[in-house]
Amino acid sequence: MNTNHYELLHDEGTPVPIKGWIQGVPVDELARRQLQNIASLPFVGPWVAVMPDVHLGKGATVGSVIPTFGAIIPAAVGVDIGCGMAAIRTTLRADDLPDDLARLRAAIERNIPVGNGNGGEHRKLPDSVETQLERSGLMPRLHAIKEKHRRIRIDKIERQLGTLGGGNHFIEICLDETGAVWVMLHSGSRGTGNLMGTYFIELARERLSKRVLGFHVPDKDLAFFMEGEPLFDDYVEAVSWAQDYARHNRESMMTRLLQEMRRHLPRFQTDKLAVNCHHNYVQRETHNGRSLLVTRKGAVSAQVGQLGIIPGSMGTRSYIVRGKGNPDSFCSCSHGAGRVMSRTEARRTITLKQHRDATAHVECRKDKAVVDESPAAYKSIDAVMHAQRDLVEIVHTLRQVLCVKG
């Protein structure tokens, strides 16, 4: 019996298929067109996989898995290189949390810089962050990249390791179905990764304008580096560094988050169950016996038995999942609920009262500046999970009780 639940989304004549796990979830026409453009490139394939949280993205479609051979597309990875999730289960129970979590939220926001700009950076580098930076080996690798590409700025790395950033990045305290307390966070490679990604995207566009090709590139954001070119190797080196930096950033924040919780909550330990996964990245993988560069833009690796995190929007549910290793999705799943409104549309459409009502059970910001992150701006996480039931199984269902947004 066929247990796959994908639909074929490609137009007639598209060089490779587009397989989409989209049953019961909306997909806007612009996202579909963007996917067609990606699938038209001769080095993409053997097919493109589309996750149920799919929506229009900058450079490439969010919620897509793009395998390539002999080439790499920097804008498909994007500028939030290595963005991802981390979650740890603690020995705390729901009864250990105070009725009012406002003081704890304020303490977290004081000790972990949030938001973009100078306010989202360390004024004085904490000792724990400085130690982690020294031990990580990140700095010598970064200087080696800088030696070859002088235009890349590296002055933000120290001030931003262990900081959240803005947009849809968050820190949460959650309860699972048994009443166990979890801590979870979402962030990436911050300003340094952004600057690095932007730099290589511009280089790829410059190179595209000088290439003599036997095929059409329908969007300049799909500019690429060919394997064997020096810039291909340089980009792989840089993106690998940014992905490692993003992981260290999450680990640093998690350490400081747990320290702050220990100051305000009863004594506890962390469980062995911990997850730290990227959802904006590229790596070389073997599928169907073929070596491919697999770019997951808003998608998570879901190999057989592999744990992952699929967060809902603030005020809804999130999930710890175990991968089923579905080869049709290149062993992938969604990275969240996926936007159904642009930020501009959400600010115009969602009222402050609607946002407050939707997040009434969560200790979080209730002001206009975060309305674009309100649950109504996102797809139904229930529908998203149902659409990918052949990609992952649910291990734990989490509900937020505290949320820090940048």
Image: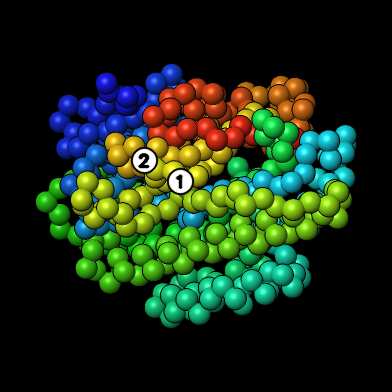
Q: Residue at x 51, y 38 (%)?
A: 321
Per the image, label 1 sits on a secondary structure element best described as: loop
- Left or right: 59, with 383 as reference point: left
Q: Which mark is residue 325?
A: 2
387 and 74: which is toward the camera: 387
Compared with residue 328, is residue 44 higher up or lower down, i.e. above or below?
below
Which residue is label 1 attached to?
A: 306
- Left or right: 323, with 316 as reference point: left
- Residue 301: where, in percent of width, then height? 42, 46
How far apart, in angstroms, are the residues tagged by discs 1 and 2? 8 Å
Q: Give residue 403's quadrant in the image.
A: top right
- Residue ranking furthest to the left: 214
Per the image, label 2 sits on a secondary structure element best described as: loop
Q: Are marks 1 and 2 in contact (CB under 8 Å)?
A: yes
Compared with residue 301, is residue 7 higher up or lower down, i.e. above or below?
above
Q: Estimate how packed mark 2 is, as few (under 14), some (14 to 19) or many (20 or more) residues with alpha carbons within 10 Å.
A: many
Q: Quadrant of the N terminus?
A: top left
- Residue 4: where, in percent of width, then height? 32, 26
- Residue 166: where, in percent of width, then height? 64, 48
